Amino acid sequence: MSKTHSDPQVSFLCDQNLGRLARWLRIMGFDTEYMRTWDEDAIERARTSGRIFLTRRRDFASDRQSIVLKSDFLKDQLSYLDNHLKLSEKLHPHSRCSICNAPLKYVKAQDVKNLIPEYVSTTRGTFARCPHCLRIYWKGTHTVKMVETMNRIFKTRVGS
Ligand SMILES: [Zn+2]
């Protein structure tokens, strides 16, 4: 199997212990659902829709559609997933809402002018809005820091 084109649409379900990881996977652009409590139905839905189930529970170690994360640390979890799934080759940073997982829609400054600080609306050209929770995203110092963090984790260059 080709390592770059085998599964460009990789998607996840994170268990209740992996909330931080779920947020980061979304920031990196991966379709990631999160279950706040243990939910057999959600796991079953993930199975039928081809999502990879990420869990801390070792009894899933022999399940082919699950990945058991042994570390509690976000950085180790992401490195582990990168080793197994080549995440760093499939990043689409800032394309998805980190809170509710919906794909972001790009909007012009004038469309969100009243919803963001004035200095932001005058210095940035494009904004992304979550169609679900209506949160507005723009590139700024916080996104630069996120990309730096991703670079450190994956030790590869990530486009901003
Ligand atoms: Zn949202």
Image (cartoon, helix red, strand yellow):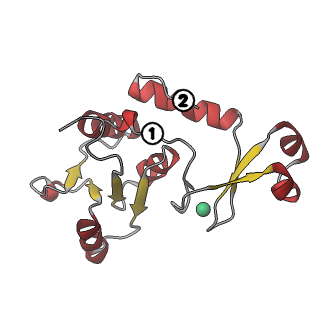
Q: Which residue: 57% across, 35% down?
A: 146
Quick one: SS at disc 2?
Answer: loop
The quadrant where ligand 1 appears is bottom right
Density class for disc 1 (Cα within 10 Å; few <14, some 14-19, many ≥20) is some
Q: Earlier in the sequence, mark 2 or mark 1?
A: 1
User: Farthest left residue?
Assistant: 62
Question: Measured along the vertical axis of the image, is residue 47 above or below residue 139?
Answer: below
Density class for disc 2 (Cα within 10 Å; few <14, some 14-19, many ≥20) is few
Is the residue under label 1 in contact with that under label 2 (CB below 8 Å)?
A: yes
Q: Which mark is residue 48?
A: none
Quick one: SS at disc 1?
Answer: loop
Q: Which residue: 16% across, 54% down?
A: 58
Residue named by callout 1 = 91
Task: Report x, y in % for residue 85.
Answer: 27, 40
Query: Residue 78 falls in which quadrant of the image?
Result: top left
Task: Report x, y in % for residue 140.
Answer: 71, 36
- Quadrant placement of the N terminus: top left
Q: Is residue 20 left or right of residue 78?
A: right
Residue named by callout 2 = 159
Query: Residue 12 falls in which quadrant of the image?
Result: bottom left
Q: Is residue 136 left or right of residue 93?
A: right
Task: Report x, y in % for residue 118.
Answer: 90, 46
Query: Residue 2 falls in which quadrant of the image?
Result: top left
Q: Nearer the viewer, residue 47 or 40?
A: 47
Task: Report x, y in % for residue 75.
Answer: 39, 35
| Amino acid type for the residue under numbered disc 1 | Leu
- Quadrant placement of the C terminus: top right
In three-dimensional space, the C-alpha distance between marks 2 and 1, rounded to whole angstroms, equals: 9 Å
Q: Which residue: 22% across, 50% down?
A: 67
Question: Measured along the vertical axis of the image, is residue 12 above or below residue 75?
Answer: below
| Amino acid type for the residue under numbered disc 2 | Gly
Q: Is residue 111 left or right of residue 14?
A: right
